[in-house]
């Protein structure tokens, strides 16, 4: 049995909702004739039919996988329908997918605190809703249980051969002698089933969910039965689940830490971690990581569901693998301009729709030097205050790139300009805007602020942005608290325009930094193809 934990964390009802083959579903909604057919979304680069980035469950039955290219998928299943990802500015345009994700979030947020974790994943804290149901209309007394809820998979529920699985679920939900935690989870089962059906009704999308007492367990469970199903982890099944769970399947253990646990400590399953005292893990991996490992071995995670429906940052990136590496400064500038244009558009719509401004601009790049002993050296990420307006963002991003390149190659003179390349190549570029905060007050000064920055965006922003007329923000319930726009209060803290460039990325939290880098490595692993496609670059943390 898991070690006793504080009642408060055991008694939470947390759900992780994950859309099924998300990009495929979005494309199938656009083209309903594709529904039910083996379908995949491919990257726009047509080399060998394009890389698959999302695969329908019908296509998976034929053995089609995300690692394949379109041509390979056609060989495996000639009738597979390949849909190209929308393209804008020479790169994938994910806005349709992002908006579709927002539709889902606005529905899920109706029953509890909701955290948008990526383009197609959401955490929900349903504790209050479950407690309320338990008081007002407890499932134990319900005559009929919704069919969707009865299809739930409850870990540890004994479904011997021949037994009626739905009947077992019904009995589990109806148990009067269950402890408080299981009764709360029973409520969670009903609430999540209802929410998933509502998502289907309003958006035509199916999703899967995990329901447990914390985020970590809910996330593990949501992927266990897909598509369009939900899995529940009662407290009593936590140990059984973790004992055999391969360590690398655990969030945050897919990388170096997971490898070290396997290689250095002989830990292959999460359960294997139980043999180590906390001090030993701390000694080897540091205090925080050691304690975290000790906790996850016991299914303990105190991580809260953050009330966040909007992205923490915005990013736009593209990879240039193999011979596509950018080898001249003008080529880099060209692509930076495209990325910044996209970023600027998204910042404007965030300002327009959500009344939020971003404070920090960051440039990340991956590079190589062809003739250098120091080939391990990374291209330094650089950040500076963000100035609104496409031209300013482009200018600042280019300056960040130049500063990074100077440091990366050790010197930077005129010889690196123009078409001349001194043996470096850029294999990925991304720009991101972070430290996004709601506007506290003073729309008048916002107009002044942008007016001061004679940019091409100002006019479009002014026309689309009802900053001076809209007094309150309309957001789905469960969202963070936003300040009212106050016309009589012009004080606002905008980023100063002094020029500073920082080496680190202080405004992206660890998870975001990890996401950005894993995005880039994921893409380059695939050779020429997976360009700018990861949901993680959306920084939700997109
Ligand atoms: N995606 C991408 N590149 C990747 C991984 C994912 O572009 N390397 C995009 C396409 C996916 C979406 O993000 O549809 C969500 O990714 P998931 O990993 O959640 O996978 P799916 O939703 O496609 O399928 P599943 O039902 O297995 O979750």
Image (cartoon, rainbow, N blue to C red):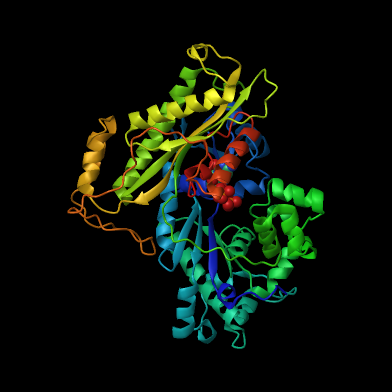
Q: Is residue 102 visible?
A: yes
Q: Is residue 156 visible?
A: no
**Whether residue 430 is situated above or below residue 111 in the rendered picture:** above
Q: Quadrant of residue 219?
A: bottom right
Residue 69 in the image: state x and y as whole percent.
62, 34
Q: Quadrant of residue 394?
A: top left
Q: Nearer the viewer, residue 278 or 429?
A: 278
Residue at horizontal 17%, vertical 54%?
488
Image position of 266 (left or right of 42): right
**Whether residue 61 is situated above or below residue 143 in the rendered picture:** above
Q: Quadrant of the N terminus?
A: bottom right
Q: Nearer the viewer, residue 247 or 265?
A: 265
Residue 366 in the image: state x and y as whole percent.
58, 30
Residue 56 in the image: state x and y as whole percent.
57, 48
Q: Nearer the viewer, residue 498 or 364?
A: 498
Residue at horizontal 70%, vertical 72%?
2
Residue 269 in the image: state x and y as whole percent.
76, 58
Image position of 324 (left or right of 135): right
Image position of 373 (left or right of 458): right
**Whether residue 37 is situated above or below residue 88 in the rendered picture:** below
Q: Count the labels in the image.
A: 0
**Whether residue 512 is situated above or below residue 13 in the rendered picture:** above
């Amino acid at each position: 049995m898991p070690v006793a934990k504080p009642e408060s964390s055991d008694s939470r009802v947390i759900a992780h909702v994950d859309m099924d083959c998300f990009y495929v579903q979005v494309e199938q909604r656009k083209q309903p004739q594709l529904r039910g057919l083996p379908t995949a979304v491919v990257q726009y680069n047509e080399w060998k039919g394009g890389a698959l980035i999302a695969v329908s469950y019908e296509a998976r039955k034929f053995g089609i996988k995300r690692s394949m290219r379109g041509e390979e998928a056609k060989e495996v299943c000639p009738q597979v329908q390949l849909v190209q990802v929308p393209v804008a500015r020479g790169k994938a345009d994910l806005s349709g997918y992002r908006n579709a994700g927002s539709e889902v979030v606005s529905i899920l947020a109706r029953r509890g605190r909701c955290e948008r974790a990526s383009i197609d994943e959401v955490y929900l804290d349903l504790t209050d809703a479950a407690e309320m149901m338990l008081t007002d209309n407890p499932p134990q007394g319900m005559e009929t249980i919704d069919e969707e809820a009865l299809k739930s998979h409850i870990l540890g529920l004994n479904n011997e051969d021949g037994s009626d699985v739905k009947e077992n679920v019904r009995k589990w939900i109806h148990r009067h002698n269950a402890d408080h935690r299981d009764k709360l989870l029973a409520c969670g089962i009903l609430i999540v089933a209802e929410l998933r059906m509502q998502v289907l009704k309003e958006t035509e999308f199916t999703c899967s969910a995990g329901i447990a007492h914390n985020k970590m367990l809910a996330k593990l469970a949501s992927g266990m039965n897909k598509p369009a199903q939900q899995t529940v982890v009662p407290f009593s099944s936590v140990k059984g689940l973790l004992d055999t769970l391969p360590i690398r399947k655990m969030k945050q253990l897919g990388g170096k830490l997971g490898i070290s646990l396997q290689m250095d400590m002989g830990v292959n399953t999460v359960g294997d971690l139980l043999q180590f005292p906390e001090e030993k893990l701390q000694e080897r991996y540091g205090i925080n990581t050691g304690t975290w490992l000790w906790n996850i071995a016991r299914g303990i995670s105190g991580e809260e569901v953050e009330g966040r429906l909007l992205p923490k940052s915005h990013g736009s990136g593209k990879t240039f693998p193999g011979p596509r590496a950018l080898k001249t400064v003008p080529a880099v500038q060209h692509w930076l301009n495209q990325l910044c244009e996209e970023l600027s558009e998204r910042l404007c719509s965030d300002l327009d729709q959500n009344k939020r401004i971003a404070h920090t601009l960051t440039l990340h790049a991956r590079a190589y030097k062809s003739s250098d002993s120091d080939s391990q050296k990374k291209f330094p990420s650089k950040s500076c205050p963000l100035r609104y307006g496409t031209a300013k963002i482009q200018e600042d991003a280019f300056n960040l790139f130049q500063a990074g390149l100077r440091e990366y190659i050790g010197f930077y003179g005129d010889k690196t300009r123009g078409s001349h390349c001194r043996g470096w190549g850029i294999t990925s570029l991304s720009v991101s805007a972070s430290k996004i905060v709601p506007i506290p007050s003073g729309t008048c000064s916002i107009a002044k602020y942008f007016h001061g920055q004679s940019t091409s965006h100002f006019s479009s922003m002014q026309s689309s942005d009802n900053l001076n007329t809209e007094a309150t923000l309309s957001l789905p319930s469960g969202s963070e608290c936003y300040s009212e726009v106050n016309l009589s209060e012009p004080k606002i803290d905008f980023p100063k325009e002094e020029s500073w460039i920082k080496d680190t990325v202080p405004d992206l939290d660890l998870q975001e930094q990890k996401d950005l880098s894993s995005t880039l490595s994921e893409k380059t692993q695939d050779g020429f193809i997976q360009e700018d496609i990861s949901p993680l670059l959306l920084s939700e943390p997109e």
